[in-house]
Structures are given as C-alpha cells and as structure tokens.
Amino acid sequence: MMIDSVGAIGAQALGGVRSPAAAAQPAGGPSFGEALAQVVGSAIDTLKTGEAAAIQGVVGSTPPMKVVESVMAAQRSLQTVLAIRDKAVSAYQEIARMAI
C-alpha cells in the first residue's frame, strides 16, 4: 500500500511522463510472453503435423517427399525451441550468480 501511494505521487510529480518500460513497449504490440507463446504454439503445431505426416508415410498414404519435408520442418522447429530454452536457462543462471 505504501509503494502504491509513492508511485502515485511520483506519477503526479512527473506530470504524466511514462516509465521507460512503458515507453519501450510499442503501442498495441504483443508482450514478450505473448510472442513466446505464439512461437511455442507454432512449434507444437509443426511437430504435430510432422508426426501425422510420418504416420501417414508409414501407412503409405503420403508420398515420401512430403513426409521428409514435414519431418525436417518439425526438426527445425524443435531445434529452435531447444535453442530458446538453452538461452533462457543460461540467462537464469547468470541472474542467479549475481551478487545482491
């Protein structure tokens, strides 16, 4: 409650100047979490498509070239997601090592 009142006083003193975090985010643009959720959702869809194509290829209802294209797209998506995960873990470890 005390912090809220200090924030309100600071906003009045600045005369409506936005914070740097608010200024950095473009108006109407997605947040980082929303953008990350979109990327992960797209990767999941690609992996499901690759899996379905592989199953259809085993059955023989899909040409081998289509199966290879779908599986390769799924592999690229998985590698991208793993790279993002590795960077996030690395960033977390760096933050955890910082002295307070």
Image: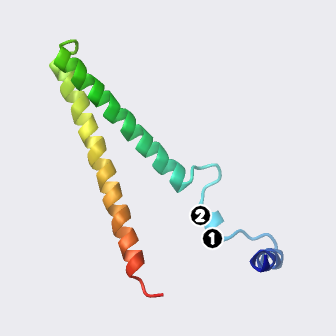
Q: Amino acid at mark 2?
A: Ala
Furthest residue in direction bottom, as rendered: 99
Residue closest to the eye, 79 or 56: 56
Q: Amino acid at mark 1?
A: Pro
Question: From mark 1 to mark 2, how far is it between C-alphas?
Answer: 6 Å
Residue closest to the eye, 49 or 65: 49
Q: Mark 1 packing: few (<14 Cα in 10 Å), some, or many (20+)?
A: few
Q: Is residue 7 left or right of residue 53?
A: right
Tell me where residue 12 appears, x and y as whole percent.
Answer: 83, 75
Tell me where residue 48 appears, x and y as whole percent.
Answer: 34, 31
Task: Residue 35: give its label.
Answer: none
| Applied colour scheme | rainbow
Tell me where residue 9 appears, x and y as whole percent.
Answer: 82, 78
Q: Quadrant of residue 13?
A: bottom right
Identify residue for label 2: 24
Element carrying mark 2? helix
Q: Quadrant of residue 3?
A: bottom right
Identify residue for label 1: 20
Which residue does the image show at 53% across and 49% down from the upper left? Answer: 34
- Vertical arrangement, residue 18 with respect to residue 2, above or below: above
Instruction: Classify the position of the N terminus by image quarter.
Output: bottom right
Tell me where residue 33 appears, x and y as whole percent.
Answer: 52, 53
Q: How many marks?
A: 2
Element carrying mark 1? helix
- Vertical arrangement, residue 51 with respect to residue 16, above or below: above
Q: Mark 2 packing: few (<14 Cα in 10 Å), some, or many (20+)?
A: few
Q: Is residue 65 left or right of residue 85?
A: left
Which residue does the image show at 28% across and 30% down from the upper left? Answer: 50
- Vertical arrangement, residue 4 with respect to residue 54, above or below: below
Q: Is residue 99 left or right of residue 71?
A: right
Which residue does the image show at 38% across and 81% down from the upper left? Answer: 97
Q: Are marks 1 and 2 in contact (CB under 8 Å)?
A: yes
